[in-house]
Image (cartoon, rainbow, N blue to C red):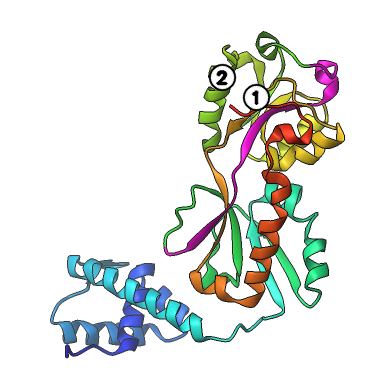
Amino acid sequence: MQAMPPLRALQVFRHAANLMSFKEAAKAMNISQAAVSSHIRKLEAFLGLSLFERLTREVRLTREGRELLTYVEAGFQELEKGIANFSEDPYPDRLTVTTIPSFASRWLVTRLEKFQSLYPRLTISLIPNWHLANFREDGIDIAIRFGKGNYENLTSIKLLDETLLPVCHPDLVGGQKVTPEALTQLPWLLDDSDDMAGPWRALQETIGVEIPDDSVKVRVTESSTLVEAILGGHGISLLRYSLVYELLESGLLFCPFDVSLPADYQYYLVAPEAKFRSPKVRAFVSWIIAEVQSVAAAPGEHGTGTTRQ
């Protein structure tokens, strides 16, 4: 069997290599900088090679150090994943969920009361955030993300296939459907996020007219802001159906042209595989998958008169 260096030395190397600093590694591990240097020297002696270049104010990984880090990082991640399978949940009565702000405010927060009525002993902590959680350090149980589902070292379950609709306040068009040419005369408010560039081109191709740049009055990157602007009658926008379908059903918003486009991104439930096995996360996943069925119907089934393309 291959002799192995001390696990502690590998752990110190991992921190120092990822942080590129012996000082920061010492802080992260709550040990002295001298102890970090000692562990690294012993690991280098064991392997018979240098892992770091020591410069005046910094350290850099050598080629061998970079190669070793790949294996050490993968090994520790697998070890942490395995330990998590056998560790007791320190907060079995608290469920921490993170998701993008628009989905949190426009869809999830209004429905959490239903979940809590089914599981009254669970306290829900909702964290609106654009950044993917660090599940190991942030105490997050599950994330709801809007993307392509490819999250490294995490399990993702598609939650909802999203569609996009042109939506405005009824007063903007007198509550009547309009022609493609009339759409070019309306003030447009656009979601300028990366995933919207393709659907914006697809909309113009589908209606057969080009919407001039001077028709675009406002560009933002947050859908909730757009919804508020549209409710205020300030223009028309291409919006995610899940965020506006209740406003369409109530008549507060209106689809002035019958078209529906697939979104480039979709909603996913995201977490480490072990998280999906915990009772509280299983309960949440089961509940939310059932709940999104109210959104999953085609837009035309909710009285918007809109057809898919």
User: Percent from the top left, x then y, of residue 247?
Assistant: 81, 37
Report the residue at 46% width, 78% height from top: 28
Residue at mark 2: 206
Task: Please provide the residue range marked out in magenta.
Answer: 153-176
* Picture layout, residue 203 above or below residue 192: above
Residue extending furthest toward the top: 181
Q: Amino acid at mark 2?
A: Thr
Relative to 200, 228 lies left or right:
right
Report the residue at 22% width, 67% height from top: 67
Q: Amino acid at mark 1?
A: Val
User: Percent from the top left, x then y, of residue 3?
Assistant: 18, 90
For the residue pair 162 and 50, the one nearer the viewer reads as 162
Residue at mark 1: 259
Discs 1, 2 touching: Cβ within 8 Å: yes
Relative to 132, 237 lies left or right:
right
The N terminus: image quadrant: bottom left
Separation (CA) of disc 1 from disc 2 = 8 Å
Dot 1: within a 10 Å radius of its alpha carbon, few (fewer than 14), some, or many (20 or more) residues?
some
